Amino acid sequence: MHRVVEGIVLRETDTKEADKILTVLTRSEGKIAVIARGARRKRSRIAASSELLVYSEMTLFQRGNWSMMDEAATIELFSGVRRDVELLALGSYFAELTELLAEEDVPAPELLPLLLNALYALGTLHKPQEQVKAAFELRLLSLSGFEPLLDGCAVCGRTAPEVPMLDVVQGLLHCKGCALNGPKGLSMPLCEDSLKAMRHVVSCPPKRLYAFSLEGDALRRMADAAEAYTAAQLERGFRTLDFYKSFRIHEAQYRAERNRTQKDAEQ
Ligand SMILES: [Zn+2]
């Protein structure tokens, strides 16, 4: 009784002997747990398909409650992401978010392509990390029942607030001057361009997700709002996100240091 699924590994855990327990996001069955027997042996034929963020065609068979991986053929290794520690850290955050929001044994016809396209945008198209991260977070939350209401100010109804703000706890747009009630509110500042990009991300056809361009402060506003919105809606932080951000901080320090050295050299 074998079955074939296409899926990507969201989490891998070493277990007894040379086995791994995998959390896999599949198109047809949603999130499933898979035992990959012998995956840590050197010559295992399923070793590559048992690695984090590898997308494969997996042949599974059922033993009691468990799906056992019998054979697998990799479809996409996402080596551009997996070779770069910083991108791998960001991809791991995407995997952690997806694992949290995907349902078990419920088909995931939208979540799987969303994750695959995000990894492709990072590793192959080399889209800006902030853009991919913000679009992925907002779209994933929207698909999972946490879509923010961005049509107009929740208080006065204006569709183009002069200084738009996103209340990340309530998921509501409002003008800076139209304060929303509630002691637990946290509002992030947006601008015309960042609001336009966010509206695009929550409503566009899947293939157009990254078809927007934002730079500088507008991109940073969208990125900060999307990250705060994710944390507020899901009411938690993420270990993988902290790890990713530690790379970004080091990179910023390195760049500042390099600029200083260059300036010194020029003088
Ligand atoms: Zn208003």
Image: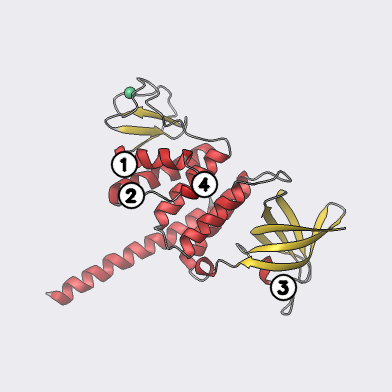
The nearer-to-camera label among 3 and 2 is: 2
Q: Is mark 1 within 8 Å of ligand 1?
A: no
Q: Give whichever of discs 2 and 4 has the lower sequence position.
A: 4
Q: Position of residue 261 (x, y in %)?
A: 22, 73
Q: Amino acid at mark 2?
A: Leu
Distance from Cα at disc 3 to Cα at disc 2: 43 Å
Residue under circle 2? 214
Distance from Cα at disc 1 to Cα at disc 4: 20 Å
Quarter of the image for residue 163 reads top left
> Dot 2: what SS?
loop
Which quarter of the figure is the C terminus placed in?
bottom left
The nearer-to-camera label among 3 and 4 is: 4
Residue 241, compared with residue 176, is above or below; it is below
Q: Give whichever of discs 1 and 4 has the lower sequence position.
A: 1
Q: Position of residue 233 (x, y in %)?
A: 52, 37
Question: Where ligand 1 lies, by quadrant?
Answer: top left
Residue drawn at point x = 35 percent, y = 20 percent: 156
Q: Amino acid at mark 4?
A: Pro
Q: Give whichever of discs 3 and 2 has the lower sequence position.
A: 3
The nearer-to-camera label among 2 and 4 is: 4
Q: Give whichever of discs 3 and 4 has the lower sequence position.
A: 3
Residue 110 image label: none
Distance from Cα at disc 3 to Cα at disc 4: 36 Å
> Dot 3: what SS?
loop
Residue under circle 3? 40
Residue under circle 4? 206
Residue under circle 1? 193
Q: Amino acid at mark 3?
A: Arg
